[in-house]
Image (cartoon, helix red, strand yellow):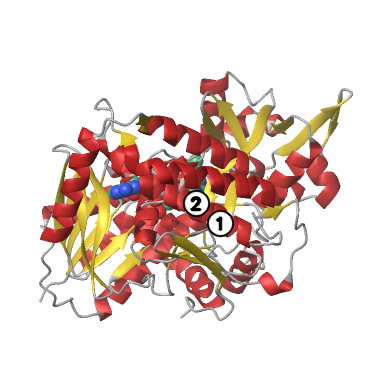
Amino acid sequence: MMKKVLIIGSGIAGMTCAIECAGKGMKVSIVSPYPSERAQSVLAAGGINAVLECGTDGDSINCHIEDTLKGGCYIAGRNAVRGLCEDAPDIIRWLEKIGTVFSTDTDGTIRQRAFGGQSYNRTCYCGASTGKQIVTALIMEARRLEGLGMIERRTGIDFYSALIADGECCGAILHNRRTEELEAECADFVVVATGGMNALFRMTTGSSLCDGYAAGKLFEQGVELKNLEFIQYHPTTMITGQKRMLVSEAARGEGGRLYYDENGKRVYFMEELFGKRGNLMPRDVVSKCMEETGKDIFLDVSFLGKERIMQRIPEVYELCKKYRGIDISSQSIPVVPSVHFFMGGIAVNNEHETRIRNLYAIGECSSIYHGANRLGGNSLLAAVHGARVATASIEKRSPGNKQYDPTQELNAGRERFKELRSSKSSFPVMYIRDMLAQNMQDDLGIERNSDRLRKGIDDISYYLSIADKINYDNSERIYYAYSLEGILTAAKATLVCAMSREESRGAHLRSDHPQTKDKWTASTIISYDNGAYNTKLDVEGIYEN
Ligand SMILES: Cc1cc2nc3c(=O)[nH]c(=O)nc-3n(C[C@H](O)[C@H](O)[C@H](O)COP(=O)(O)OP(=O)(O)OC[C@H]3O[C@@H](n4cnc5c(N)ncnc54)[C@H](O)[C@@H]3O)c2cc1C
């Protein structure tokens, strides 16, 4: 019997999984609120890591593994990381085959640049629009399979909840934005690929579509979350109104230097602290050092000259010119750290399965390869690799033989919609979402402490206590109303994880616990039980096989 796979989210992870599953003869349905062209994946600028020519310059897959484990402060599972790095060269070949146009030398060799925390230049790139180029190639390939009737792509669809019976997932309840109604889709396997949790924060380089709802809802439904406290602040972002625009690490990879001004003299503080490769230290280190200076920080690439800038980082040139009127061939860029990437997310085993059978999570919404901090260029890789691993696991499985009747869940959801539509309460949804984003920004900054975290948990608990009394203003989508509780739950779980880890490691810096402690060399797992948030350290590595 043909297996049916429902994929939620159509960024690089979801689209790769759709193509891979269809290629193995499965019937695939992939849903998302907007087309893939609007997924956060298209923002990825700098590149994707792979050791292409082992040994030519001293680099090796073992070295990629060690850099990844070290960058993650040794809490990512070695076997999973090994799989990631070993698969990387084949992933690049596959991406090329389906039409990704990488930047090459005249002889066709793929160019590789330096990226933070890596011992060698191993980041393959397409100018500074790597994500866009990969997504374009994936769309072309998915269209081909769609034409053959092997994939169905639907937009205007949000995840509402998972259908779970006897610890086994058998589909999902979805929200159709066009009809504003709920519908059920049964499937043998469900793969969640909904991206990070950027919209929980006010100042982020990421997309507001990545709001953490799916993770929060699944958590309430029994899925465990992992390592939520590890949130990567990217050191070089530009303030552009309410948004933070990424100044790709490629700018530092090409030699860009960070400095502050002291009495008219430039202080290249990263080089003073760490020597020649100082500007390319892992992102948590750079962000922390920037914050510690207490000064306005600038990034200078002007010495590269306009010709090289236009050759190697033209998008950085265009972005700075367009959004801040800065000509980077003669002027420095003012930069600040901002929320960028989530190392934590849905807990999965090495096959990307959650603790609910037949429910998988891949891409940035899952937590597996990056430990306490991610190396730039490793997340695009992880999005593709995770999709391949999940596909291989699903391929081995027999289709679920449950005939599931979703009527009860559908009716409960419809009842909830009715309540939301008729609510006369005075708590406007968008106000609470705004307050949440500000709270998270204030209480979960680069450095945290127990007072701020406690305050954050209390504030979010209060919002949760009024979340069922919200006023659904008809001018907004009902999505914003029904998703509020799940988003708040994800936010609270994040704060609780940060509170529980009483040490500093990677992207989690506690001013009240500044040391890294050996006994904490393990992942944080958080589970939900009737409103209680329970954390534990995964010292036994339960998710690592
Ligand atoms: C500015 C920027 C630059 C980056 N540059 C790099 C880089 O150079 N190299 C690198 O390796 N990584 C980079 N990253 C990180 C990388 O882009 C992401 O980790 C990766 O693209 C995530 O892919 P994904 O498929 O998991 O998620 P996404 O691309 O975020 O896709 C998520 C999908 O899920 C959908 N979705 C969300 N919520 C729901 C819901 N409730 N219901 C249904 N669908 C939903 C979304 O609409 C979308 O289709 C960068 C990130 C940013 C923000």
For marks 2 and 1, give the CA distance. Answer: 6 Å
Judged left or right of residue 6, residue 513 is: right
Callout 2 secondary element: helix
Q: Position of residue 186 (x, y in %)?
A: 15, 63
Front position in the image: 376 or 451: 451
Disc 1 crowd rating (10 Å Cα; few below 14, some 14-19, many 20+) is many
Q: Residue at x 84, y 48 (%)?
A: 273
Q: Which residue is mark 1?
A: 496
Front position in the image: 59 or 366: 366
Residues tagged 2 and 1 counted as in contact (Cβ below 8 A): yes
Judged left or right of residue 533, residue 483 is: left
Judged left or right of residue 363, residue 36 is: left
Q: Position of residue 374 (x, y in %)?
A: 58, 57
Callout 1 secondary element: helix
| Quarter of the figure with the N terminus | bottom left
Amino acid type for the residue under numbered disc 1:
Val
The quarter of the displayed image where residue 430 is located: top left
Q: Which mark is residue 49?
A: none
Q: Position of residue 32 (x, y in %)?
A: 26, 47
Image vertical order of residue 270 relative to residue 534, above or below? above
Q: Residue at x 51, y 21 (%)?
A: 322
Front position in the image: 200 or 101: 200
Residue situated furthest right in the rendering: 263
Amino acid type for the residue under numbered disc 2:
Lys
Q: Which residue is mark 2?
A: 492
Q: Position of residue 445 (x, y in %)?
A: 63, 43
